Image (cartoon, rainbow, N blue to C red):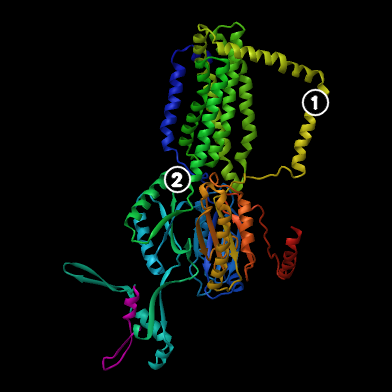
C-alpha cells in the first residue's frame, strides 16, 4: 500500500484533502466547554420537618429513609444528615449502572414511605447533576428589595424568551410571601383571635373549581376565582362585620406587606443589594456561543434599563476556554514553525513543507473523529491534543530523515521513500503501542477524576492513529515527489555552509563525546544510575509532590465565615463589613503592582446564608467572593493576596471558623475528607473524644 500511494500521482493528495475537508467542516460544529460531561451517580432526597430538632429528624425521618432505601439495588453508599427542620439523604450509585432506573427506584421507595409524622412535608427527590453555569448577570441600583425582585423577574422572563437559553435562575432572594402583622390591641378590642384572622384570610383568598353547568349550547365550567396575590388585595379582606353593616377590614387591624421568607437569602454586589441571574447551558450547547448570546442580551437590557440600574457580568467561565484554545493554537503554530525550520536546514523547502503538514492533517482528522464520537473541545481534550503535538511530529521527522539518509546512500527517490518508510515502520508502530500502554490505564480510573481523565487517552490515541495514516500513506508520496524535484536542483550556499558546519560539529565534538562515553562505560553507567537514584529521592523526601491536577491560578478568591447557630443576620453583616474592609486594603497594597495602576479587585459579591464548607444554611453563614484581574494580566502571588487578606481581617468576634481560599475549579474536590460516624449506640462520647484530639494529630 505504501508503494501504491507513493507511485500514484493523486491518491495521497485526495486522501489528505479529504481529511482536511471533513475536519474543517466538523470544526465549527465541535462544542467548546470547560470540562467533559460526566454522568451523574448521586440522588438527593430532602425532607422538611418544620419545628423539629436534629435528634427528632434523625429518629423520625433518617431512620425511615435508611430502612426504605437500604434495599435499593446498585447502591454504593447511603448517607443521611439530620439538621434542624430538615433531613438530607444522598444515595450514591455503583458506577456503570443505569442511572435512570436507579433514580426511579429511589423515588418509588421514598413515595411509598407511610411512617413519617403528619407535619413532615413531601420529600423532594432530585438528581445531583453538574450544572454548567456560563455567566452570572448582577442587577443593582434598586434599593427596595421588592422592587429589585420585580424588575429582575421581568429581566429573567425576557432572557428565558430566547430559545437558545436553556436554563436561567434568579438568586439573591428567598421565596416571596405576604407578611401580615396583626395589632394585639386591635384583636382585644374586637374580641378576635389570631385564628379568626387566619380563617378569614383562608376563606377569602381561594381559587377553586365550582363544578359544571350543563346548558343546551354546551357545558360551562364554573370556578370560584378570588385568589389574593398583592398586599392591597389582602388588605381589603373583611375580618369582622356587624348586623348594622359595620365592616372591619384586614388593613384596619394589621399591616400587610410583601416580603421574603428568609432575610438572610440575599446577595450584595460591590456593596449594593443585587439580584443575580445565573445562565446555564445544556450538554449540547457551545459555551462560547452561549456567552456571545448573553453579551447580546445584556446589551439590549442595558439599553432599556431605567436610570440608575446597572447590569454587570460576574463569574464568567468563557475566558478559561478562550485561554486554553489560545494555548492550543500557539503550541500548534510554534510546533509547525519549528519543525518546518529545522527540516528546512537539512532539506529543501518543499520537503520541509510536507513534513510539517502532518500536524494540521492529524489535528483536523482528530477533530472530525471527536465530533463524530460526541466529544467536546474542553480542558482535557485540549491537553490530549497539545501532548500529541510532539509525539506525532516525531514520527514524521523519523520517517523523513530515514528517507533522506537512504537517498544519500545512492537509492533512487521511489525506493528511498518506500524502503525508508518500511524500515522504520516497526519502530514507529512500537512507539505508538508504547504510548497506548502508558496512557491507556487512565481510561480505567474510577470516580469523578476518572470520569474526566478517561477522555485524555482516547483523544491522544485518536490523534496518533490518524498521524500514522498520514505518516505511512500520505507523507512518503509527498516526499518522493519532493525528492524528484530536489534531485534536479542545485544546493544553495546557505545549505552547503550549514551542512559543512553540522558535519564539523558531528565529527569534531559529538562523535568524540560518544567515543569517550563508550570507553568509560562503567563511569557512564554509574552516572545514569546516580541520576535515577536522585530522581527517586525527589519523591521520597517530598521535594517533588504528587497532585492529581496541577494547581491553577484562580481569578476568584473567597472568604467563608461560620458564626454560631442562632447568630442574627445583623451580627453576620458586621463581620462581613470587617472582611470587606480588609479586602479594600489588599486591593490598595497590590494596585501599584498592576499595569497602569489597575485595581486588583474588579467586583465583590457577598452571599449571605451560604458557606460550602459548612454544608448548611442560615443567617450565621456568609461567603465573600472577589473577582480579580485575569491571572495572565495581574502581578503578585495568589497566596500572598490571601495571606494579606487574612492578616488585615484579624480576629472576627464570635466567628467559629473562617477560611480564605481561591475558588476551586474542576472535579477533584477536597484533598482529604474525614468522616466521623456513630456506628453503635453509646459511642457518641468516644467519637467526640477522638475528634477533639484529631487536629493535634494532623
Q: Residue at x 37, y 86 (%)?
A: 253
Is residue 574 in view from this perspective?
yes
Q: Which residues are magenta?
A: 230-250
Magenta-colored stretch includes residue 655: no
Location of residue 308 with respect to 53 vertically, above or below: above
Circle 2 residue: 287
**Which class describes the residues within 10 Å of circle 1: few (<14), some (14-19), or many (20+)?**
few
Would you say 655 lies left or right of 237 here?
A: right
Where is residue 208 shown, x and y percent of the image?
Answer: 32, 73
Residue 418 in sight from this viewpoint: no
Q: Earlier in the sequence, mark 2 or mark 1?
A: 2
User: What SS does tag 1 mark?
Assistant: helix
Callout 2: SS: helix
* Relative image position of residue 389 (x, y in whole percent): 56, 30
* Residue at mark 1: 525
Q: Which residue occupies the foreground of this view, 424 or 358?
A: 358
Marker count (numbered)? 2
- Name the side, left or right, on which 592 lies relative to 193: right
The percent position of residue 366, horizontal first and vertical second, equals 50, 31
Q: Position of residue 613 (x, y in %)?
A: 60, 60
Q: Is residue 239 within the magenta segment?
A: yes
Answer above or below: position of 37 versus 45: above
Amino acid at each position: 500500500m505504501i508503494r501504491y500511494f507513493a507511485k500514484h500521482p493523486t491518491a495521497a493528495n485526495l486522501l489528505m484533502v479529504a481529511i482536511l475537508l471533513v475536519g474543517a467542516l466538523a470544526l465549527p460544529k465541535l462544542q467548546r466547554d470547560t470540562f467533559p460531561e460526566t454522568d451523574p451517580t448521586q440522588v438527593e432526597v430532602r425532607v422538611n420537618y418544620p419545628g423539629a430538632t436534629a435528634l427528632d429528624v434523625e429518629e423520625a425521618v433518617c431512620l425511615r429513609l435508611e430502612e426504605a432505601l437500604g434495599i435499593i439495588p446498585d447502591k454504593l453508599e447511603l448517607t443521611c444528615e439530620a439538621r434542624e427542620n430538615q433531613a438530607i439523604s444522598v444515595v450514591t450509585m455503583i458506577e456503570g449502572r443505569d442511572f435512570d432506573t436507579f433514580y426511579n427506584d429511589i423515588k418509588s421507595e421514598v413515595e411509598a414511605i407511610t411512617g413519617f409524622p403528619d407535619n413532615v412535608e413531601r420529600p423532594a427527590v432530585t438528581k445531583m447533576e453538574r450544572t454548567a453555569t456560563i455567566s452570572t448577570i448582577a442587577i443593582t441600583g434598586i434599593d427596595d428589595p421588592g422592587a429589585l425582585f420585580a424588575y429582575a423577574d421581568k429581566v429573567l422572563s425576557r432572557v428565558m424568551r430566547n430559545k437558545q437559553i436553556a436554563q436561567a435562575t434568579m438568586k439573591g432572594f428567598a421565596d416571596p410571601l405576604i407578611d401580615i402583622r396583626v395589632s394585639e390591641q386591635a384583636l382585644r378590642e374586637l374580641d378576635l383571635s389570631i385564628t379568626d384572622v387566619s380563617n378569614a384570610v383562608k376563606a377569602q383568598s381561594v381559587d377553586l373549581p365550582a363544578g359544571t353547568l350543563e346548558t343546551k349550547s354546551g357545558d360551562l365550567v364554573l370556578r370560584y376565582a378570588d385568589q389574593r396575590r398583592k398586599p392591597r388585595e389582602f388588605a381589603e379582606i373583611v375580618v369582622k362585620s356587624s348586623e348594622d353593616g359595620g365592616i372591619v377590614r384586614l388593613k384596619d387591624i394589621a399591616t400587610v406587606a410583601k416580603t421574603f421568607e428568609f432575610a438572610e437569602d440575599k446577595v450584595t454586589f460591590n456593596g449594593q443589594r443585587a439580584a443575580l441571574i445565573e445562565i446555564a447551558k445544556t450538554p449540547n450547547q457551545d459555551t462560547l456561543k452561549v456567552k456571545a448570546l448573553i453579551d447580546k442580551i445584556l446589551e439590549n437590557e442595558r439599553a432599556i434599563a431605567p436610570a440608575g440600574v446597572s447590569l454587570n457580568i460576574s463569574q464568567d467561565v468563557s475566558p478559561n476556554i478562550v485561554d486554553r484554545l489560545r494555548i492550543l493554537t500557539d503550541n500548534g503554530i510554534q510546533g509547525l514553525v519549528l519543525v518546518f525550520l529545522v527540516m528546512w536546514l537539512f532539506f529543501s523547502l518543499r520537503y520541509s513543507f510536507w513534513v510539517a503538514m502532518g500536524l494540521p492533517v492529524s489535528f483536523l482528522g482528530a477533530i472530525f473523529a471527536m465530533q463524530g464520537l460526541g466529544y467536546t473541545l474542553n480542558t482535557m481534550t485540549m491537553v490530549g491534543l497539545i501532548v500529541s503535538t510532539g509525539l506525532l511530529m516525531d514520527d514524521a521527522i523519523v520517517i523523513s530523515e530515514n528517507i533522506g539518509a537512504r537517498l544519500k546512500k545512492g537509492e533512487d527517490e521511489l525506493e528511498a521513500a518506500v524502503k525508508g518508510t518500511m524500515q522504520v515502520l516497526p519502530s514507529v508502530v512500537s512507539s505508538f503501542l508504547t504510548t497506548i500502554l502508558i496512557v491507556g490505564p487512565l481510561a480505567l480510573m474510577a470516580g469523578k477524576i476518572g470520569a474526566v481523565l478517561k477522555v485524555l487517552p482516547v483523544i491522544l490515541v485518536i490523534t496518533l492513529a490518524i498521524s500514522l495514516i498520514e505518516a505511512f500513506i500520505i507523507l512518503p508520496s509527498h516526499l518522493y515527489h519532493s525528492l524528484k524535484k530536489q534531485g534536479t536542483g542545485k544546493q544553495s550556499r546557505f545549505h552547503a555552509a550549514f551542512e559543512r558546519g553540522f558535519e564539523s560539529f558531528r565529527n569534531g565534538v559529538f562523535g568524540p563525546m560518544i567515543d569517550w562515553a563508550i570507553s568509560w562505560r562503567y563511569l557512564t553507567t554509574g552516572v545514569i544510575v546516580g541520576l535515577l537514584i536522585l530522581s527517586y529521592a525527589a519523591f521520597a523526601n517530598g521535594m517533588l509532590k504528587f497532585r492529581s491536577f496541577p494547581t491553577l491560578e484562580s481569578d476568584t478568591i473567597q472568604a467563608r465565615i461560620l458564626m454560631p447557630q442562632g447568630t442574627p443576620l445583623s451580627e453576620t453583616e458586621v463581620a462581613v463589613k470587617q472582611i470587606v474592609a480588609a479586602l479594600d486594603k489588599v486591593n490598595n497594597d497590590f494596585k501599584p503592582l498592576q499595569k497602569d495602576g489597575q485595581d486588583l479587585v474588579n467586583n465583590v459579591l457577598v452571599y449571605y446564608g451560604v458557606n460550602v464548607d459548612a454544608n448548611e444554611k442560615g443567617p450565621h453563614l456568609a461567603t465573600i467572593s472577589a473577582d480579580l484581574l485575569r491571572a495572565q494580566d495581574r502581578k503578585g502571588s495568589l497566596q500572598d493576596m490571601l495571606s494579606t487578606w487574612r492578616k488585615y481581617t484579624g480576629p472576627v468576634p464570635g466567628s467559629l471558623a473562617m477560611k480564605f481560599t481561591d475558588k476551586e475549579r474542576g472535579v477533584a474536590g477536597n484533598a482529604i475528607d474525614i468522616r466521623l460516624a456513630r456506628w453503635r449506640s453509646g459511642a457518641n462520647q468516644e467519637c467526640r473524644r477522638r475528634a477533639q484530639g484529631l487536629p493535634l494529630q494532623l
